[in-house]
Image: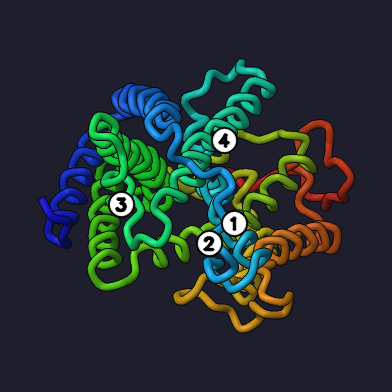
Amino acid sequence: MNDSDLLRGAVYAILGAIVIVVVIYGYAFMLLANKIVVFDNTALFLLGALAYSGALDLGYDPGPEAYALGSFWPTFVLSALIVMGNPISFGAFLGDWSRYIPANTKPIRLLAATWGAQVATLVPFLFGVFTATLVAGEADYVVALINVSPAWYAVLLIAVAFLGGLSTGITSLYGTGLDFSSVFPRLNRVQASLVIGSLAFVFILVGRLAFDLLASVNAFVGAIVICTTPWMVIMTIGYVVRRAHYRPADLQVFNQGREGGAYWFSGGVNWRGMAAWIPAAILGLLFANYPPLIEGPLRNVAGGVDISLPVSIGTAALAYLILIFVSPEPRYVFGPDGPRGVPSSAEHEPLPIR
C-alpha cells in the first residue's frame, strides 16, 4: 500500500481512538498498557543491532551541507534542545503523577526512578542516530527505514512505530487531562481528556496536511522547553527555600472551586512567580531559532547558536530570587522551620479556606 495523507489520517484516527479509550478507562489500564509497550519497544530497539549489523557506517560523515542551521554548533544546540524536550515536557505535570505514589516513599527512590527513566530514553534516541545514516537524504525517515530493513524486522519496526506513538500519546493525554481538569474544575478527568484528545487530533491533522509536520513538531517541542523550563526552575527554588514543606489540602483549593489557604496569595496568584516566569518565557522565545516557524529577532546574537534555554532559565532564576528578597513571601508558606536562605514577611496566618 502506498503512503498517502489519507492513509496517515486513518492511522492517526485509529491511534487517537485507542489512546482516548485507554486514558478514559483510568490509571491502572494506562499503567498496564505502558508497561507492555515500553518493555517491548525497548527490546525491539535493541534487536535493531542484529537487524542492521554490517550495514551501519559508524564513521558516516554527511558533510557540512547537511547541517540544518548551516554549521555544527548551532545545529548541535538545536538538536540537544529537541532531545531535552522529552524529559522537560513531562516536568510540568510530574506532580499530578505523584498522587499515586505512597506517601512513605523515600525521596532518593523518586529521584532514582526519574533519573533512570530519562537515561532509558537514550535507547530510542541512539537508535535514531545510528539508523539515520542508513536513510540519509530521504524525505521520510520511518518509511525509508522500513524499506531498507530486513523483512522480519520491518514488521517489528512497524509495530514499534505504532506502539511508540500509542505509549507517548497515552501518557501525555492522561497527564494533560489531569492538568486541564484542575484548571477547569467543572470538568472531571474523563471530560477534560476527551476535550484535549479531540483538540490534539485536529492539530495533528492540520499539522500533517497543512504544514511541515517535522518543523511543526520541532517548533512545538522547542516552545515547550523554553516556556516550561523557567517554571520548573521557579518551582525548584521554591522547593528549596521552603525546605520541601507543603500543605497538601491547601494545594487543592483551586481545583475544588474554593478560595483561601496558604497558597492563595493575591487573588489566587503568586505574582512573584508569575512576574519571573512570563518575562523569562518571552525573552527565551525572542532568542529561539526553530525555523521556519519560530525565529526570534535575537536568534543571531550568539552567532547562530540557540541560547534561548539558558536565557530563559537564567532570567527566571534571577528574577524570582530578586523578587522574594525584595518582597518576601508570607511566613506561613515556609512551615515550622522557616525559610532557607531568604527572608519572609510577618504574615503568620493564611486566609481561611472557604
Which quadrant of the figure has residue 27?
Answer: top left
Question: Disc 1 vs disc 3: which is toward the camera?
Answer: 3
What residue is drawn where x is 78% and y is 49%? 347
SS assignment at label 1: helix
What residue is drawn where x is 83% and y is 50%? 344
Label 2 amino acid? Gly
Task: Give the percent coordinates (x, y) of residue 6.
Answer: 12, 59
Q: How is the image coloured?
A: rainbow
What residue is drawn where x is 67% and y is 58%? 273
Task: Give the percent coordinates (x, y) of residue 73.
Answer: 68, 64
Question: Disc 3 vs disc 2: which is toward the camera?
Answer: 3
Q: Which mark is residue 81?
A: 1
Between 62 and 204, the one nearer to me in the picture:
62
- Res 31 seen here: no
Going from N to C along the chain, the mark reached first, 2 or 4, is 4
Which quadrant of the figure has residue 163?
Answer: top left
Between 58 and 345, the one nearer to me in the picture:
58
Question: Disc 3 vs disc 4: which is toward the camera?
Answer: 3
Left or right relative to 28: residue 132? right
Q: CA distance from mark 3 to mark 4?
A: 28 Å
Q: CA distance from mark 1 to mark 3?
A: 25 Å
Q: Which residue is mark 4?
A: 118
Label 1 amino acid? Leu
Going from N to C along the chain, the mark reached first, 1 or 2, is 1
